[in-house]
Amino acid sequence: MSAVLPSAAGHRFAAPSPRIIGVEALAHLLSHAGFRVLWRDNQSDCKGVCAGLPSERLEGLDEHLLDGLDRIVEDTHGNRVLVLHQLGSHGPAYASRYPAAFARFQPACGSAELRECTPAEIVNAYDNSLLYTDHVIASAIRFVQAQQGAYDTALLYASDHGESLGEHNVYLHGLPRAIAPREQTQVPMVAWLSPGFARSAALDMNCMSARAQQPVSHDHLFHTVLGLLDVRTHVYDGAFDLSAGCRRHPEMPSVATPGRRHAAAAAA
Ligand SMILES: [Zn+2]
């Protein structure tokens, strides 16, 4: 999943009403805080978390989530959040998640019937899908990097879950949290912030790099996005904002060059 946002620099955003916060997901909260949110989905659907927001459904390889984003950003006035909901490595049809050019690990399982493949073939197909996801995330970062002249950009990526590939004879994902093996619960998170974004958010990037070495969970995602985007709301909890301890002036409003817009991209 990924996102991009531009802003009236140096302004805090109005907090949504408590009633709205009580029932809304992050994308809705950002929308009510004044961000132009676009949800692009390459999965079956967004399960309600993008309901009522501008959204687009795609079907195919994840790289198409990036198609035409430059045009969308060009047309944006104010802050923009782009959410890119990837198919990633969703099984069991791992071989359908990447094009032939990424079929580096061989032999790879080409079937959605995992019992037809050896454990090594399943792992190879999964690894190929990871290689392709790396490429998609790198392309998304290159995209937000290319917008730096006009926007302060950032990208955040997180997987929603891991995957069992036969460890303890378990496959796929979705076991209840209480019994899920670590293969399903340990996931990657990646953040990329442009120098302009780090400057306007008064972030010490050495501090952020050091923070990246510490344990993080999905509980941090919501509050970190609010913190990075300077959204003031009573549901924000600085204890779960990965950037909170890395602001040079925690109580100061963010400072940015007048007339410059913020563009942040988050991916999950
Ligand atoms: Zn999933």
Image (cartoon, rainbow, N blue to C red):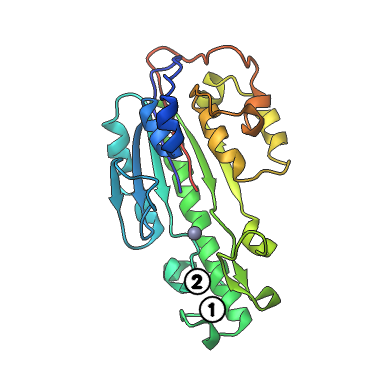
User: Residue 187, position in %: x, y?
Assistant: 62, 54
Specify whether 167 is left or right of 223: right
Q: Tell me if the residue at label 1 has its CB under 8 Å from ligand 1.
A: no
Viewer-side residue, 14 vs 138: 14
Q: Which amino acid does label 2 sit on?
A: Ala
What residue sits 72% from the left and 44% below the top? Answer: 215
User: Residue 86, position in %: x, y?
Assistant: 43, 55
Q: Sequence order check: which comes first, mark 1 or mark 2?
A: 2
Disc sitting over residue 46 in the figure: none
Q: Mark 2: few, some, or many residues within 10 Å (few <14, many ≥20)?
A: some
Disc sitting over residue 108 in the figure: 1
In the displayed structure, 111 sits above or below 28; it is: below
Q: What residue type is labelled 1?
A: Ala
**Taking the image as drawn, is residue 203 in sight?**
yes
User: Residue 137, position in %: x, y?
Assistant: 49, 50
Say what secondary structure mark 2 lies in: loop
**Taking the image as drawn, is residue 98 in sight?**
no
User: Residue 181, position in %: x, y?
Assistant: 68, 65
Q: Are marks 1 and 2 in contact (CB under 8 Å)?
A: yes
- The residue indicated by pointer 2 is 103
Q: Mark 1: few, some, or many residues within 10 Å (few <14, many ≥20)?
A: many
What residue sits 40% from the left and 31% below the top? Answer: 20
Q: Nearer the viewer, mark 1 or mark 2?
A: 1
What residue sits 46% from the left and 73% below the top? Answer: 93
Say what secondary structure mark 1 lies in: loop
